[in-house]
Amino acid sequence: MSEERKNAARNPTTWLNLIWITPLPSFSKYLAAYLRKFMNDERDFAFPSLKTIGKDTALTRPTIIKYLGVLVTKQYLTIEQGIEKSNVYKITFPSPERGKGDLPQNAEGVNVVYRGGKGGLPIGVNDVYTNKQTNKQTNKQKASCDPSAEGSPDDPVKVKTKKLPDCPAKAILLVWAEIMPDKPQPRDMEGAREATLKARWNWLLMHDNPKTQERYFSTKEEGIEWFRKFFKHCRQSFFLMERCDQFDFPWILKRERFIRTLEGFYHRGSRS
């Protein structure tokens, strides 16, 4: 199978089509369809807050948590702690070894193909569904999809999220003092400064380095070492070190400046 076909099979459209023909509670399907509207072929994740989801879907917070939890349990979704207060919802595909009873077999108008052994992913779900199949599937799943059959939809069920390592603000501040002894040294990292540093820390934990296609770091120790290299990188910028009088620790942490530094914007004509 070509890499192009493999990637196409994992896109959000295929994901939602598979969910639609799988016996899942109607609220779970509703929430999957809602999350899908934030995604495209280039982005397979979304990060609306629970408040936004509730406002847009008219569902209560406990209901949202419960039926997102169903998607997590069935391996259609992972939920990770994101930047600030929003979770990051990322699509996944269940292993055929695990969920044979949950997946449609030879459904009319649907072609589901699996490759490989354990952990294999669905590589093709047709986008065309007949009204006959849709109605048949709906009637067959009526009891299992009825929220009342599973207890009150407002029953709070906690969704497990992958906890990110806490931001070691003081350790990063010490690294700044080590690499930038000739620049202003912050006296504290409370309030807005701490929140800004935490936002940058969480962003790095949740995003891939475009050069390596891997996360910037995943542990506290790796993160501290990453900031050491980042400050050394800043030191190589002639603009930051010689011409920018505002350059200091809080200044470089602002989102736009931080990203520009990663992109090399301030290193045009840098020292070698």
Image (cartoon, helix red, strand yellow):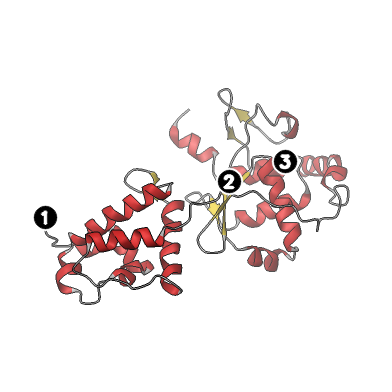
Q: Residues within 10 Å of mark 1 (few under 14, many from 20)?
A: few
**Secondary structure state at the residue bearing disc 1:** loop
Mark 3: which amino acid? Answer: Ile
Q: Position of residue 66 (x, y in %)?
A: 74, 52
Query: Which residue corresponds to the image point at 70% horizontal and 48% vertical from the top-left?
Result: 69
Q: Quadrant of residue 172?
A: bottom left
The residue most toward the bottom is 245
Residue 246 locus on image (x, y percent): 25, 76
**Distance between mark 3 and mark 1 Cα atoms:** 58 Å
Q: 117 or 266: nearer the eye?
A: 266
Q: Nearer the viewer, mark 1 or mark 2?
A: 1
Q: Residue at x 71, y 36 (%)?
A: 109
| Residue 123 x %, y % | 56, 33
Give the numbered dot on residue 272.
Answer: 1
Residue at the location (26% across, 59% down)? 231
- Nearest the viewer among 98 and 13 is 98
Which amino acid type is shown beneath numbered disc 2? Ile
Tell me the distance, in whole angstroms, between the alpha carbons under discs 2 and 3. 16 Å
In the rendered image, which residue does mark 3 sit on?
A: 21
Instruction: Tell which tag, 2 or 3, sits nearer the viewer.
Output: 2
Q: For the C terminus, give its image quadrant.
A: bottom left
Q: Is residue 128 visible?
A: no
Q: Say what secondary structure mark 2 lies in.
A: strand
Q: Earlier in the sequence, mark 3 or mark 1?
A: 3
Classify mark 3: residues with Cα within 10 Å, few (<14), some (14-19) or many (20+): many
